[in-house]
Amino acid sequence: MKMTLRWFYTADTIPLQYMKQVPGISGVVGALYDVPVGDVWEKEKIEPMIKKAKCAGLPVEVIESVNIHEEIKLGLPTREVYIDNYKQTIKNLAEYGVKVICYNFMPIFDWTRSSLAFPLEDGSTVLSYERDFIDGVTPDEMIKRMKDDSGSYQMPGWEAERLADIEQLFKQYETVTETDLFHHLVYFLESIMPTLKETGIKMAIHPDDPPWSVFGLPRILKNKQDIERLLEAVPEKENGVTFCTGSLGARQDNDLLDIAEYCLKQDRIPFVHIRNIIHTGEGNFHEVSHYDKSGSVDVVGLIKLLHQYQYDGYVRPDHGRMIWGEEARPGYGLYDRALGAMYMTGIWDSLEEGKTC
Ligand code: DNO
Ligand code: MN
């Protein structure tokens, strides 16, 4: 298991040196934030990002995310240009030592939450999801809210400059079914497969977050069945999963350890996100610390399973609480993620101690 932390590069307020101070961290998960979705990540931009982290003693072997252009998800004929660009990005990243690319195939948005600062009893704040709240607003109302309230409630995908396109995109998705979306994903993966084989890069799809339909949009990575369908449709090892416990765990009917074992048996998990949550009713949840007993996710069980499979891929603590007065991007403060990373490393190390071979 290689423990990493996510680093938002130019958009991060946490110095790399501080990340390096967390014992056991082998590298950071990087990305570029100024390249429009669909454009090639040019080497001139990749190089300074990788170098900066490397100089701090933190290699970047995982990218999260190279986002997928909507025309690929929509399956439009114009997708070919974006697929070609994606292939070039893969080649460029490979030259700088990248091994895994995390991405998602959620239409229009990345994760959705109803609050980015839900207060916990301990005085910290976390991200939360209330089904009635999300189900009770139309995309138009949400867009209006974002426009009125820009800054304080900014989720990825809802950026101010994108709000006009969002209205148009919702219209385009009206005729796209889940089956269509799935076929568009398979088409994309099959198209880039030769480039993946040539470069050795593995793709790791992030599950839908939350793992059900929001705003009437199709969702195709919600549970074991969806994962099985994808891994079977494109059986090469380069088609892998980012095993995100917080995303998949938001569905009470998802048996996380069973899904993880299914994937691990086939060596299809290049990247793991460990996040803990608590269910507060059907379709409602909020995030908590990574500590096993804080929430519903069997963090200890998962690490035991990873250890049992001698997992040598990348792991990172996903969203943590905002604690100790830290100000940072919601879910991505250093303090709680550092606690989480140490906790996971500790569990792993204790299993190593007990290993008999
Ligand atoms: C949340 C993350 C996601 C993830 C993307 C992958 O913090 O787990 O935003 O980066 O969905 O594309
Ligand atoms: Mn995640």
Image (tube, grey):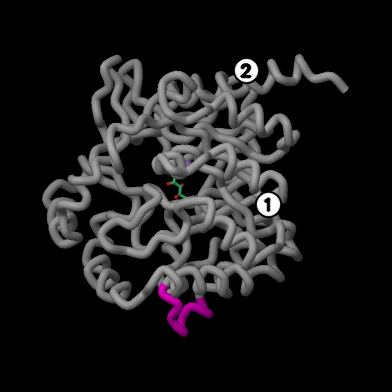
Give the spatial CA distance, label 2 vs label 1: 31 Å
x, y percent for residue 161: 26, 60
Instruction: Please rate how many residues cluster around mark 2, counting C-alpha atoms within 10 Å: few if below 14, some from 14 to 19, many from 20.
Output: few
Q: Residue at x 49, y 38 (%)?
A: 245
User: Up-down: is 3 above or below 339?
Assistant: below
User: Up-down: is 108 above or below 325?
Assistant: below
The three-letter code of the residue at mark 1 reads Tyr
Quadrant of the frame with the N terminus:
top right
Of residue 140 and residue 326, the one placed in the foreground of this image is: 140
Circle 1 — which element?
Answer: loop
**Residue 77 lies in the magenta-colored region:** yes
Residue under pointer 1: 96
Would residue 276 appear left or right of 113 to someone viewing this image? right
Q: Respond yes or no on whether mark 1 lies under 8 Å from ligand 1.
A: no
Quadrant of the frame with the C terminus:
top right
Q: Residue at x 62, y 35 (%)?
A: 27
Would residue 304 appear left or right of 179 to someone viewing this image? right
Residue 157 circle label: none
Q: Residue at x 47, y 20 (%)?
A: 291
User: Up-down: is 249 above or below 74?
Assistant: above
Res. 131 image quadrant: top left
Would residue 16 appear left or right of 36 to someone viewing this image? right
Chain part drawn in magenta? 74-81
Of residue 150 and residue 323, the one placed in the foreground of this image is: 323
Q: Residue at x 48, y 78 (%)?
A: 79
Would residue 136 appear left or right of 324 to someone viewing this image? left
Res. 200 image quadrant: bottom right
x, y percent for residue 234: 65, 66
